[in-house]
Image (cartoon, helix red, strand yellow):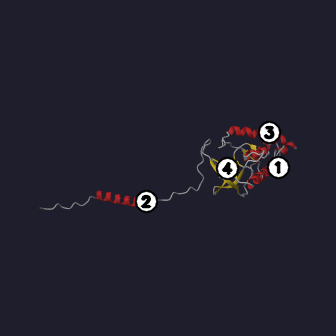
Amino acid sequence: MNSLPAVSPSPWNRWLLALALIAGIVIVLQRIAPLPIPRATTAPASPKPGSSSWTRLENCRLLPNSANDGDSFKISAAGRELVVRLYFADCPETVQRSASPDRIADQARYFGGISNDAVIAAGQQARNFTANLLRSTRFTVFTRWERVFDSHRFYAHVSLPTTPNSPADLAERLVAAGLARIHTTGADHPLGTSERQQHQHLRSLERIAKAAGLGAWRHLSTR
């Protein structure tokens, strides 16, 4: 009996066999050496305003930096370095030549029409006030990674250890000392206080500081 002739595989069948072989090799390699997951090297994308996605950074430390001032400063937190900017509090400028004249004039008007030199003096006092507080203790930062005017800074709440008769929040301490105006972006506090409640509380602290002639308000009372 005659044997049937051998049938050679078609080009299409050869392609299918090659693809199946490659797929099998890839699967085996993945099981032997899984690909590493890349680590993020930048801050998370900024959530939209009003987002409840907060990051809590414990045991933060103040880092020396020539750009540090009363409301904006460089810190070390969770193994990284970043610059934070306080919600609510806007401290006077510290150097006249590096600040916008309009900004200094606006701050001068806020504190009752004090001089530009008085604004700078209050700004330097605010910078020293914040540095002295933060250098002496570890503090907690709450941030939503919301950038300040698309800069490298992030808005944040900064909480200090509670002491008798002193607010834990750094923005509150600055306003209570007459060293900041209530002028910049605010936000609900992640521990439960609403933006409106914080704003009202800051206004009450400001009235007391103004009546007592504290900080920048001192220059107003001595004119």
Circle 4 sits on which residue? Answer: 141
- Relative to 89, does residue 65 appear above or below in the rendering? below
Q: Residues within 10 Å of mark 2 (few under 14, many from 20)?
A: few
Q: Earlier in the sequence, mark 1 or mark 4?
A: 1
Where disc 3 sits, the SS reads helix
Q: Are marks 3 and 2 in contact (CB under 8 Å)?
A: no
Residue pointed to by mark 3: 207
Question: Which residue in the rendered view is the most extreme toward the front?
Answer: 164
Looking at marks 2 and 1 on the same chain, the residue that comes earlier in the sequence is marked by 2
Q: Earlier in the sequence, mark 4 or mark 3?
A: 4
Mark 4 secondary-structure assignment: strand
Q: Position of residue 16 (x, y in %)?
A: 32, 57
Residue 161 falls left or right of residue 219: left
Residue 178 on image: x %, y %: 79, 45
Mark sitting earlier along the chain (1/3): 1
Residue 170 percent coordinates (x, y): 73, 47
Residue located farthest toward the right when viewing the structure as drawn: 222
Tell me if I can see residue 142 in this picture: yes
- If the image is split into quadrants, where does the C terminus sit? top right
Q: What residue lies at 72% left-to-right and 39% top-to-bottom?
A: 199
Q: Which residue is mark 2?
A: 31
- Report the side of 121 relative to 75 (left or right): right
Residue located 29% across and 57% down the image: 13
Q: Amino acid at mark 2?
A: Arg
Of discs 4 and 3, which sits in the foreground? 4
Horizontal side, residue 82 vs residue 26: left or right: right
Separation of marks 1 and 3 at Cα, in angstroms = 23 Å
What residue does disc 1 label? 117
Q: Residues within 10 Å of mark 3 (few under 14, many from 20)?
A: some
What amino acid does circle 4 point to? Val
In this view, the mark in front (1 or 4): 4
Please determine whether, in this image, residue 65 is positioned above or below residue 175.
Answer: below
